[in-house]
Amino acid sequence: MFLEFVHHCSYDCVFVYSLLVCSLFQALQSSTIYNITASRPLIQNQTLVSPSKIFELGFFAPNGSEKQYVGIWYKNTTFSKVVWVANRDKPLGHKDQSASLIISGDGNLKLLDGQQNTVWSTNVMTKSNYSAAVLSDFGNLVLQDGNANEMWESFDEPTDTLLPNMKIGVNVKTGKKKYLISWKGEDDPSPGSFVLGVTSETPPQLFAWNGSSPYWRSGQWDKSKFNGMPTMSNTYLSGHEIQQNIDQGTTYYFRNNYNNSFLGYSFISSEGSIESLRWSDGWSIIWEVSRTNRCEIYGTCGPFGVCNTFSSPLCSCLKGFKPRSDEEWNRGNWTGGCVRKMELNCQKSTRAAAMTTVEKDAFWQMKHMKLPDSADYLSNIADAEGCRSWCLGNCSCLAFSYVHAVGCLAWCKNLIDTQQFSREGKDLFIRLVDVDKGVPTKTKLIISLSTISGIMLFGAGISVCGLFKWRGKFRKMTIPRVLNSKATANRSEELLRETAWKGQMKQGDASELMVYDLDSILLATNNFNMKNKLGQGGFGPVYKGKLNDGKDIAVKRLLSSSGQGIAEFKNEILLISKLQHRNLVRLVGYCTEGEEKILVYEYLPNKSLDVFLFDSKEKAKLSWGIRFDIIQGIARGLLYLHRDSCLRVIHRDLKVSNILLDEKMNPKISDFGLARMFEGTQVFINTHKVVGTLGYMSPEYAMGGIFSEKSDVYSFGVLILELISSKKNTSLDYHGQHLNLLTYVWHLWCEGRGLALMDEAIADAFSLSEVMRCIQLGLLCVQEHATDRPDMSAVVLMLSGQSDLPQPKQPAFTFQCSTTHEVQSEEEYIQSRNTITITMAEGR
């Protein structure tokens, strides 16, 4: 009996023990899950793990904080950092033990607090009944539909950490940015003040901001590494990559982790340091940007200063420059930078007398350099010598560098954030006055004075001889002889002007252009055959031509009867030769043989925009997508002219017929005959020669002769509205109620019927938000007062959706009956006020 009791007792005990072990095992198993579904939420004390258990997602409280968050971290490493946070803006209370991460009824992944309130959500618009959330071995939290199609991913919403295979960057067309934003503090994941992203320029740079101020930059990407990061590995296996698609407007940086071969991450801290770490039996720093290294901080040495961590003091001026303020420099405050000691030779040459010889500038080579910020990329220059020649021929060019695998970079703005390393880096060539070569200044002065004196004596002798001859022959002159003498004098003066401007053509950038002889032009155009005529411009007719090498060209021939003349012709050559942008037409060469004045351009097969836009059949080929791309392309071209080129240029005749289209319908601004250059300090220019096209001229220019960048902005606004409607501004086809297109658009806008402006030919397929944004922007650009209009940098941001649009004011509707009023002189008007000027270093 006793043995039987013991036997039964043992059986029951074993059963109970087994039941307890099984329950404990199930409890342990339930603390780790591999997906979140509608029937399996993630609750506290549980974690979601990746298939290979590399990453883990769960609830956490940073450094003993009284706030809770949902985040991701490496699972099996010591001192693992939280690499992503879902609810960084809305923490849970520390005592909330009922919070959960669920799949909601609409298929979204949601974080609910203990009261079942939504704290955070993926906010996917597409509904799915069978959604699931999984964590990949790359650390990417992915929301999938029932067919395993990706609906949302955490890689699209980074916090302060960049994981391998995660991308950060920008899409300038959509305005979407994927940037890293620091934590506010070590125990506070909410967004801090430091931001790390990628610029959209070519070549791109990693760039950090402290608030809105530039804080750090990596230097330009050279296809393998960033030139301002000498410790960065450039081997293939390092995995650093930049993906840039100019047509799509995207630029992204990421680190490719081949086959998940390593564990690592990069992050920006709450104090502004940037670190990249890798796991190898512990976390080790691969590279870092430290706040204690002042050379890493943007603009430490100011404009034209260079920083070197091995020098004392850290900052010095570039060769040929001196501190702007010796007092501040000696205090260790170098941000004011340096100024040039001597004026450049090219600046002197513009004021020098005709008989004075001015030496060319020279370039000083600096090795192992982090290249300055704000470089202009010249894609059409093939080698280092071409890069040097271009810079030498442009007085605005202050430095250049030819980077293999990238090409020619030039700087036309202040050289800012320059650093010199002990190794790595690039060669930078600084433009200087070559004071060490040539004839001494005193000797030059003696030679110049002697030459001038000799010329004066020779001229006096000729004058005396001429006087005696004139007195002896004067009485024998007849009226026809007097007329003949006058004609000869005019011809001599004309030849003198001809020789002078041909000499000017040979200077600077125009010397880089192809000079064609007339025979080759006649052969290319079949003697200007009417069958080859493309159109009629302000200068005269434009013909299609084909050179001996098979290359198609567009030939613009100046007519002697043209309202525009030699001055505009010369202006176009000298101006376009200095401008290089994919949205500007490219000048190939020119011909000045005999009486002919001919410009040779690249040939654009789709001719001008008006050929399509104002043709009842052809306009259907301009879909809304094409029209919007054209608007954006023109805006980028104007921004380049106004702000980003080596010159500040006002076009003055922007209109639909001056927009040419290439084979892919990309726009190119043409016809620079009326363009004017601005000095850096000028705001407005006042001219008594008002030239332009009816309907596109701003009111202050048409009526007062005052033009500025805002004059081009006005023309651009008219052009936008014409592109949307396929109607000319000066057309009278507005139901008999409106003076022009602008009054018609304003009427529709005030009635809330802006969409009625849309051309019916494209009304079946368009983006409502883009169209309405463009209509509003067009009205902003044609406001009556120039100060109310946005500048082109603001326009580009508004087009990309990166900036809000204010409400427009009523546009100007006044037109001039005559477009040309000529007075011989022009005067410049520069606004000035008694104000304090503050100079700040600006990044991108």
Image: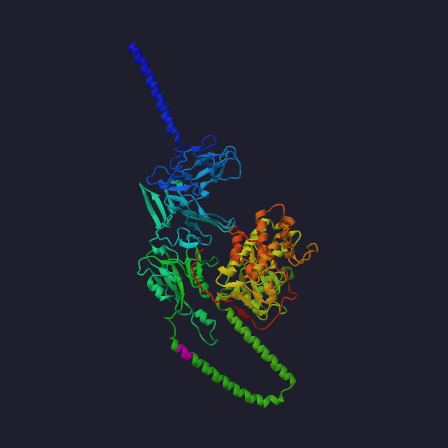
Q: Is residue 358 above or below residue 291?
A: below
Is residue 500 covered in magenta?
Answer: no
Q: How many marks overall?
A: 0
Our reading of the magenta stretch's main secondary structure is helix
Residue 784 in percent (x, y) is at 59, 60
Q: Nearer the viewer, residue 289 or 395?
A: 289
Q: Quadrant of residue 398?
A: bottom left
Q: Quadrant of the N terminus?
A: top left
Residue closest to the eye, 420 or 196:
196
Q: Is residue 101 left or right of residue 827?
A: left
Taking the view exactly as shown, the residue that stands out farthest to the top is 1
Quarter of the image for the C terminus: give it.
bottom left
- View extreme (left): residue: 2
User: Residues in magenta?
Assistant: 443-447
Q: Position of residue 122 (x, y in %)?
A: 48, 39
Q: Is residue 369 above or below residue 353?
A: above
Q: Which quadrant would residue 542 be assigned to in this image?
A: bottom right
Q: Nearer the viewer, residue 462 or 253?
A: 253
Residue 290 appears anywhere in the view: yes
248 or 509, which lies in front?
248
Q: Position of residue 769 (x, y in %)?
A: 57, 48
Would you say residue 607 is visible in this rendering? no
Is residue 802 positioned above or below 545 on the image? Answer: above
Residue in the image at 61% along x and 54% along y: 723
The colour scheme used here is rainbow
Image position of 142 with respect to 535: above or below: above
Q: Position of residue 489 (x, y in %)?
A: 58, 80
